[in-house]
Image: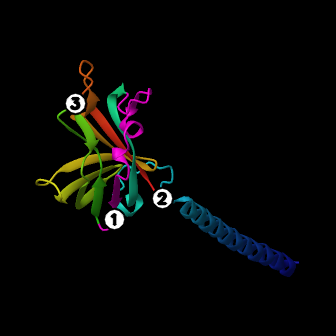
């Protein structure tokens, strides 16, 4: 009888140690699985909010001007429709393009309206190049060729656009008394859309 009791105790102990070993293995397997799931769910921020992201590759590309906005709607092309977007009022802004390269350089061709003695015409294209840097959704372009000295701009990226705001800047307008073309001063913005 003693021998049967000892075998029974041995079976219980052996069974318990196997059970404990299996439970430990299951626990570590479950912990490893949870770690894999956690690691797989970590990824880049895909919601378009790049605050704090200074990666030039995300913002690099070719951007074409899509609007040149002035504070007051005018009928600059005398077609009966007034607009605050000068691109709908004059073809002089067409083909304005900026290319941001991944190496931190950029090139730009800027087309605009020119006014001389009350007469409006397309100004000569301004071709510039330089460097650019990124801080979150803002980029700063510094002109090193094609401008007088070094000029810097800060742009804001939203979706596939970059916007340049120019407070108290000259923009084309029409003198309400004489009907001559002239420059007015106000806050303007230029929007470029990635191609």
Look at mark 3 in the image and give the residue it sits on. Answer: 182
The location of residue 15, given as percent across then percent down, is 77, 74
Look at mark 2 in the image and give the residue it sits on. Answer: 44
The location of residue 59, given as percent across then percent down, is 39, 57
The answer to which of marks 1 and 3 sits earlier in the sequence is: 1
Q: On the picture, is 29 further left or further right than 5?
A: left
The location of residue 13, given as percent across then percent down, is 74, 74
Q: CA distance from mark 1 to mark 2?
A: 22 Å
Secondary structure at numbered mark 3:
strand
| 78, 60: nearer the viewer | 78
Q: Residue at x 21, y 34 (%)?
A: 170
The answer to which of marks 3 and 2 sits earlier in the sequence is: 2
The reply to whether the magenta stretch includes residue 90 is: yes
Q: Magenta residues?
A: 75-103
- Closer to the eye: label 1 or 3: 3
Q: Residue at x 31, y 47 (%)?
A: 155
- Closer to the eye: label 3 or 2: 3
Q: CA distance from mark 3 to mark 2?
A: 49 Å
- On residue 4, the disc is none
Q: CA distance from mark 1 to mark 3?
A: 36 Å
């Amino acid at each position: 009888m003693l021998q049967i009791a000892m075998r029974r105790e041995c079976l219980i102990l052996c069974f318990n140690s196997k059970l404990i070993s299996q439970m430990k293995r299951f626990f570590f397997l479950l912990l490893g699985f949870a770690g894999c799931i956690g690691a797989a769910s970590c990824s880049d921020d895909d919601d378009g909010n790049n605050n704090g992201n200074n990666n030039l590759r995300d913002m690099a590309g070719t951007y074409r001007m899509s609007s040149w906005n002035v504070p007051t709607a005018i009928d600059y092309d005398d077609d009966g429709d007034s607009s605050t977007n000068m691109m709908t009022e004059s073809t002089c802004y067409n083909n304005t393009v900026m290319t941001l390269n991944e190496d931190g350089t950029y090139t730009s061709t800027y087309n605009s309206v020119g006014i001389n003695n009350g007469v409006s015409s397309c100004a000569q294209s301004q071709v510039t190049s330089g460097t650019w840097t990124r801080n979150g959704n803002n980029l700063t372009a510094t002109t090193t060729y094609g401008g007088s000295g070094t000029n810097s701009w800060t742009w804001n990226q939203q979706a596939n656009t970059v916007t340049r705001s120019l407070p108290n800047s000259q923009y084309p307008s029409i003198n309400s008394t004489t009907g001559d073309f002239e420059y007015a001063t106000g806050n303007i913005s230029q929007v470029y859309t990635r191609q």
